[in-house]
Structure formats: C-alpha cells, structure tokens
Image (cartoon, rainbow, N blue to C red):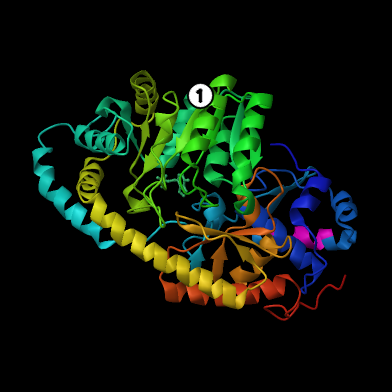
Amino acid sequence: MTGISAARLALLVGDLSAARRPRYTALADRVRLLVSDGRLPLGARLPAERELALSLGVSRATVSAAYARLREDGWAAARQGSGTYAALPARRVHDAGWRLGAADHGAVDLVHAAPAAPPEVAAAFAAAMAELPRYLPEPGYHSGGLPELRARIAARYTARGLPTTPEQVLITSGALAAIALAFSLLLRPGNRLLVEQPTYPDALAAGRARGAQLVPTALDPETFEEWPTIAVRALRAVRPAVAYLIPDFANPTGRLLGEADRERLSRALRRAGTVALIDESLVELGLDGEPPAPFGVHDPGSIAVGSLSKLFWGGLRIGWVRAEGDVVRRLAANSSAIALAGPVVEQLAACALLDKIDDAREAARARLREGRAALLGALAEQLPAWRVTPPPGGLVLWCKLPGPRSSGVVLEAERLGLRLAAGPLFGTGHVLDDRLRLPFTQPPDVLRRAVHLLARADARAAGQEGPAHPAAPDLVV
Ligand SMILES: Cc1ncc(COP(=O)(O)O)c(C=O)c1O
C-alpha cells in the first residue's frame, strides 16, 4: 500500500486555525474523518511527523500528539520501524466506507439518500409469499433474473419510449452491483473514465477499483447549462473508454439533462468511441415534471442501470442492467461466475411493486415534495448564508457553504448527534469542501431538527461558537 504525501494530506485536512479545540485533537479528528469516509485508504502510510508539521504549519509536537491519539483510538497503527498507517478500529470493521457508523442509533442520519420502506413494500412481500409455492418445486436458480421481473422492467423501458425485450435486461443485486459489473466489462487498468463532478461516490470507488483514471467534468447547479459543453470538450480531448452519467435527477445535484443535450452528448460520445454507462436509479423521482425519454433512445449502444432502492427500498437489493442483447449475455456470464442467481422472494416482491408503480410513485413524490419544502424552508431560516438551487427531482439538496468547511461541519455535527457526508466525497480530488449534500428523505420534523443541529455545527466549524466539549487541558500548542 502506498503512502500519502505531507502536502496532499495537509490539503485534505484543510485549515485548522478556526478549530476551538486543541490543534492536535482537531488534526486527529480530521484524519479520522478522512479514514472513515474512505478519502484516506486503509493501510496508507501517513507522512513523517516532521514533514506533516511543516506542511500544516504546526509544531511537530502537535502532529506527534495527533498520531498518538489516532493510534490510541485505533484509527492508525504503528509498524515497528516503518511508520504509522491508516487503520480501522476493530469495532468498526463491519461498516463500509463513507457510511461508517450507520448503526449509531439515536443519531439523525443525513448520510443515506434513500427512503424508509413505504407500506407497499410489506404488502409486496406478502404477495410474494403467496406466489412462492409455485416456485418451490424447481431448484430456484434463475440466471439473469426471474423472467417475470425482466419482462416487467423491459415493459417499463418500452413505455418510457425505448423498446426493450426481456433478453435485454439483467437483474442485479442493486444498481451499484450493475455499475461494478459493467465497469468490469468495459474498463481495463489505466483506461479513462469520464464522470460528472460531483457524482455518486460509490461509482467513483467502483471505477478506481478497476484501476481507471477518472476524468471529472464540473457540474454546478448554478451553471448547469455549461456542463454539456464541458463534457463534449472533454470527450473530444480525452476520448475516455467510458462515461458514467446520471442524466435524470443526478445524485447529488438533482440535475435533469434536457432532450437536446442528450442528443448532442450522444453524438460526441459516438465520435469519441466512448461507451456511456447511464445511471437511471433516480429516474422515477421527478418532483416538478417528467424526464425526457431514456438516453438509450439517442445512444442505442449505451448501457443503462436502474434500481428499486430509491423509489421503494434499498433493502430489496433489486437493480438491473439494460443493454443490447449481446452485451447482456456477456454481463450475465460474468455475473453468474460470481453469484449464480438472485433470491426469488425479493424478485417476486419486485414484480408486485412494479405492478403498482404508478400509485407508488405519486405517493413517494408527494412525500419527497414535502421533505424538499421543509428542508429548503428550514435552511432559508437558519442558514441564510448557504445557497441552494432547488432540484427538479431526486432525493437531495446540494448546498453551497460560505467557505470550505464541509469536513469541519461534518465533525462538529457528529458531536451533536447528526450524521452527514462531507462534500469532497462526491468529487475526484480534494475539491468540494464548500459543499454539503442533504437528503430530504426523512419526515419534515426530523429535517427541521437536523437543520437546527446543522446551524450549530456550522457556527462551530466557522469558529463562531465554543467547542462542543470543554477543551482538554493536556497540550497547549
Ligand atoms: C446514483 C445512484 N446510483 C446507484 C445507487 C445504488 O443503488 P442500489 O441501492 O440499487 O445499489 C445509488 C444509491 O445511493 C445512487 O444514488
């Protein structure tokens, strides 16, 4: 495992001067956040104390004390004679990446951008159990997915304007598995992968896991209309192997790509020889209107992934790939080499949910509109200096903070019982620390309470309010 340079770690840690607690604690906290949300890979060697002290402009004693604190708490480990390495405390090993600590009961969770299961989900499982006896006499392995489910998903594409057969659909364990599967077919180490920036962090991780070189294209809610030009230019200049795009209510910006831009982008993709991987996980969540026809109408060679996690429930673990038949066959072969087939009951429940999708959509959209209004209202009242462009759909607001302090806000919020994902997670480098993603999937009263805590966390991170706990008196630097 490689190390991280002092200069880069200093950049990721940011300015410690506003911290009201002792600098060494503030530094240890920042490094802990970087390890826990995956920005600092496990096993990465931390810089020598003297070098980091120089890069941060603090004393060596401060870095020494911070490293000692990290080791004490299990976030770093010392190896005899070879330095200090990023580690995970033993009690955290079952948590994953940037959602670490998801099981902290009692905390308000604004990390997950996914709804609690609506009543339709339990009803769908009851319907699935009633259907199950018909399937029990067979072995239960349905490679590629249950034919009934593939047919329903194909029909939905056809209804949305992209004629699709069941053979063009492959069921996966959620959209992320679909993304990883597609990347494993399309990307070789060193290949370029064009992404929107910001984008969905786990897709970035899946690209990195394939050894891809990420090519970010800036997507700013205040200047959405500039992104297609930026993307077309990048396609021409870089000719990436793959472009991972979220045209419908993107996570985290909520951006909806218009029909003309889809057409323009498809032409540029064709010219560059780039395969588009289109993430449609949020396509059913238009809050102010319907999205245009699927991207595949313009770019028949593109591969789409979808999911029931955002409209229904992440616990279903139902996602899919939609592509040309030969691509689906190759993906299915790769997929069954890892998992022979998906679980039958969940797929039957998914069929029942899709049979009532129109009513469920209306109910979900009404809940989300209410959440969006509550969150926008509370932010305008309590954090008027933050800027937010109301998104036309999706599950989250992408907020602009008055300064680069999103990681600091996350740490302060954690102390107050509010869990957040820091802005830089959604980018490919150390950018976006002036951004924070806030999901509006929770009930309005929870959202208002969350913003109350957020305003306190923001004031502390900006150095305008005292520390959450009395400062430890043991080291003054
Ligand atoms: C854009 C996007 N794609 C994919 C996923 C993963 O969805 P699934 O639960 O189906 O794996 C998410 C969930 O956060 C998402 O926001």
Q: Circle 1 sits on which residue?
A: 186
Give the left or right position of residue 75, taking residue 361 as reference.
Answer: right
Can you give x and y, in whole percent of width and height, for residue 2 in the image? 72, 37
Helix, strand or loop at disc 1? helix
Question: Which image quarter is the N terminus in?
Answer: top right
Whether residue 446 sits left or right of residue 198 in the image: it is left
Residue 187 to residue 342: above or below = above
In the displayed structure image, the side of residue 457 where residue 148 appears, left or right? left
Please give the name of the residue rendered at 36% of the width and 18% of the height, measured from the top-left corner: 326
Q: Which quadrant of the structure image shows residue 387?
A: bottom right
Q: Position of residue 121 (x, y in %)?
A: 25, 56
For the C terminus, the quadrant is: bottom right
Say if the magenta span includes residue 255: no
Residue drawn where x is 12% and y is 38% of the image:
136
Which segment did they paint magenta? 63-71
- What amino acid is found at the position of numbered circle 1 in the picture? Leu
Q: Nearer the viewer, residue 291 or 90?
A: 291
**What x and y, as percent, mark residue 138?**
13, 32
Question: Which quadrant holds residue 43?
Answer: top right
Q: Does the magenta stretch mainly form a helix, a strand or a loop?
A: helix
